[in-house]
Image (tube, rainbow, N blue to C red):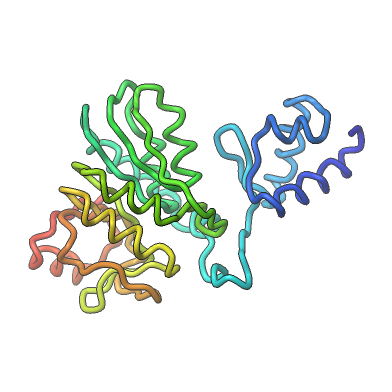
Amino acid sequence: MGNRDERLKRIIQTLKINTASTIQDLAEELDVSHMTVRRDLEVLTEQNIVRLIYGGVILNQLSAAGNGEHRYSLIDAGSLHPEAKMRIGRKAASMVEQEDIIIIDSGSTTEYAAKYLADGMNATILCYALNVLLEIAQNNTCKLLFAGGTFHSNTLMFESPEGINLIRRIRARKAFISASGIDARLGITCSNDYERETKRAIIQSSHRKILVADSSKFGRIESDYFADLSEFDEIITDKNISAEYVRIMEEASITLHIV
């Protein structure tokens, strides 16, 4: 396909149907080289239409209107407080030790935890989100377990009874868990009801429960409750956390890592 404008339209149409695609699949569909696809994607990236990930691309401004998933978009969330999320993810990755068995939750912050895993790290990692999976897949020394199921395009999360059963059979030393809201009285909340059971399974299957969330999540309440604050052993957040919540964590004997 020689006309660039036609290729760009075709790429967008493909991503609207599939949400994500690999460079290889797009090159085959358009009958062009990988380099041509990458140049086309650079144009769409500059226009904020797509987001490049390892080996592929995701459509920006994802929504699944009509099935209750329009409330939250991981792509939109990822554009908020990126430097804080990067520092939080790097700190989380530094806490992974050789021979660890860990679970990494879906989310824009947990993606960085996967991204910054040390080279040569020999750990077993269970995940169930596309963005986290693609980051871990680059680490050749980690053993990767993937809990699949129905794909939710707004969070890039896969979810199913079989995936939840897999999580329940695992015993993890550490779990890095994301949240959309953290409130001292009303607990830890997420933005989609389908996330709840998976997050509960993680908490029940893990020895150390580590909440990873930037400071904007504190004092915020979303629709779907999944845990009490007291269920977490540690929290990683950024330096803008309020003095009130620092005090609340101290009183609850929760280890707070401020990065």
Which residue does the image show at 91% across and 32% down from the upper left?
2
Picture quarter containing residue 249?
Answer: bottom left
Percent of width and height locating residue 242: 25, 67
Query: How many numbered badges does the structure rendering display?
Result: 0
Percent of width and height locating residue 96: 24, 36
Q: Is residue 111 visible?
A: yes
The extreme right residue here reads: 3
Vertical order, 11 against 117 (above or below): below
Out of 47 and 179, give the one closest to the viewer: 179
Picture quarter containing residue 40?
Answer: top right
Which residue does the image show at 55% across and 59% down from the upper left?
154
Name the side, left or right, on which 38 lies relative to 218.
right
Vertical order, 188 against 90 (above or below): below
Name the side, left or right, on which 6 lies relative to 257.
right
Name the side, left or right, on which 219 lies relative to 5.
left
Q: Is residue 79 visible?
A: no
Picture quarter containing residue 159?
Answer: bottom left
Percent of width and height locating residue 78: 49, 54
Percent of width and height locating residue 254: 13, 59
Which residue does the image show at 40% across and 51% down from the upper left?
162
Out of 112 and 195, give the one closest to the viewer: 195
Q: Quadrant of the N terminus?
A: top right
